[in-house]
Image (spheres, rainbow, N blue to C red):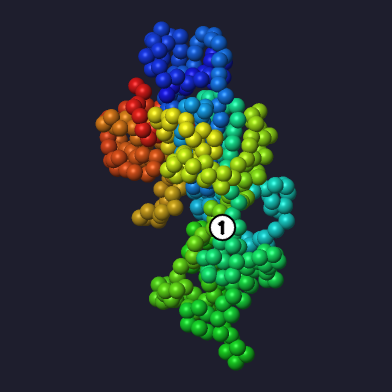
Amino acid sequence: MVYVLNPFGQPLMPTDDHRKVRILLKEKKATVVRRSPFTIRLLHRTKQYVQPVTLGVDAGSKHVGVSACTPEKELFRAELMPRNDVVDLMSTRRELRRSRRNRTTRYRAPRFENRVHSKRKGWLAPSVEVKIHNHNQLIEFACKILPVSLIRIETAEFDLQRLKAMEEGKPLPEGEDYQHGEMYDQYNVRQYVLFRDNYTCQCCGAHPTDKKPVKLHVHHKESRKVGGNAPNNLITLCEDCHDLLHKGIVELPDDKKRRGKSTRDATFMGIMRKTLLQRLRDKMGIPIQNTYGYITKAIRESNGIEKTHTSDARCIARCPKAKLAAEEYLIKPVRRHNRRLHKNAILKGGYRKANQAPTFVFGFKLFDMVDYNGEECFVYGRRSSGSFDVRHLDGKKVSAGVSYKRLRLLEHPNNLLFERRGGSSHD
């Protein structure tokens, strides 16, 4: 499929006539805008004949499916993997800043009123903001290469109290139970964890009394960076057990080691659904409709379609019988900048290696699309010796150390990286 733009950059209907495209390029009546997905821009005026195109979006926290269809044919199919590294990056930044301030500045009492969320109404955590941004990026890109006339999005809202009750085998909440949540009538998370564990060390069973005072700590089963401050990631330990646990001398009992199933993705979907729809309606001059999972499921099952993110998106677009597109794309957004000056690991001699590298190494940038032995892949790592690490977008390694001389540059990176899952390449 070749996507076509008019001389002013507005989208026209795509074409499967590759012969005609080659003639237009050879006669300089068109120019290549991007290689993946292959898009050309006409250099001469043409008639603006377009058909109604519906874009179906299966929103998600880890995978987003999109499908742009007419009733007869699917024109674009892709799966996007939103960024999930923001929590880790911000946690690392917080650790480095706290360490630096402790070394170089006096103690200053925290000022809790000086916070962004107290100043700006509608503030969302950066980890949520980046995923909403990734959804918007994908939808805007599809509208740039296709004449989309309607966007239909499936969003979901999960009943977290009900899910937790089902996992723990407790009675399902009803009525006023939803007002009395897990931490109802508790001052904060730490106080709730101590109360839940009956103010008893979950490792040795120590319990503070008048005759024997015991200092209790709240321990993260998984690191705060990975597991957060959710109650199921916290456990009560006495001061001695907490110290020995971090030294690796003692271990938690087997039934206390695991934190249980994380609800981070379900929480994200509940937070982002209204914000995503509202921002799209404010920004796009295209009708935006919301749909629900049970409707998608009914359409998919009544047409005997296998469940995938892209097939769900096609059902969301209400074009289940459309002829499938020949190519499917895997899309991955990447960060543009890395401002950290030094790497975390301290080398021999007590010095820290510089983190910044030249933009180009032997003519290649990070995340360049390259051809290696006839296979499309991306540059994930570069060495000054000329040995590069090349991989697919899903993380599968093609070669951990291939010479730059064996690579052929196909395309420099943009905010979104595209990898073709099926079909032939355009050279």
Visible in this render: residue 387?
yes
Q: Residues within 10 Å of mark 1 (few under 14, many from 20)?
A: few
Residue shown at 51% from the left, 31% from the top: 68
Residue shown at 53% from the left, 70% from the top: 169
Q: Is residue 55 left or right of residue 15?
A: right
The percent position of residue 98, horizontal first and vertical second, equals 56, 57
Q: Is residue 6 left or right of residue 330?
A: right
Give 188 or 340, whichever is nearer the viewer. 188
Q: Is residue 383 left or right of residue 239?
A: left
Which quarter of the figure is the N terminus placed in? top left
The percent position of residue 122, horizontal first and vertical second, equals 70, 47
Label 1 sits on residue = 98
Visible in this render: residue 137?
no
Give 310 or 420, whichever is nearer the viewer. 310
The percent position of residue 3, horizontal first and vertical second, equals 47, 22
Helix or strand or loop: what does disc 1 sit on?
Answer: helix
The percent position of residue 377, horizontal first and vertical second, equals 35, 35
- Which residue in the rendered view is the most extreme toward the front? 302
Count numbered badges in the picture. Answer: 1
Residue shown at 54% from the left, 58% from the top: 263
Residue shown at 62% from the left, 76% from the top: 195
Give 79 or 377, whichever is nearer the viewer. 79
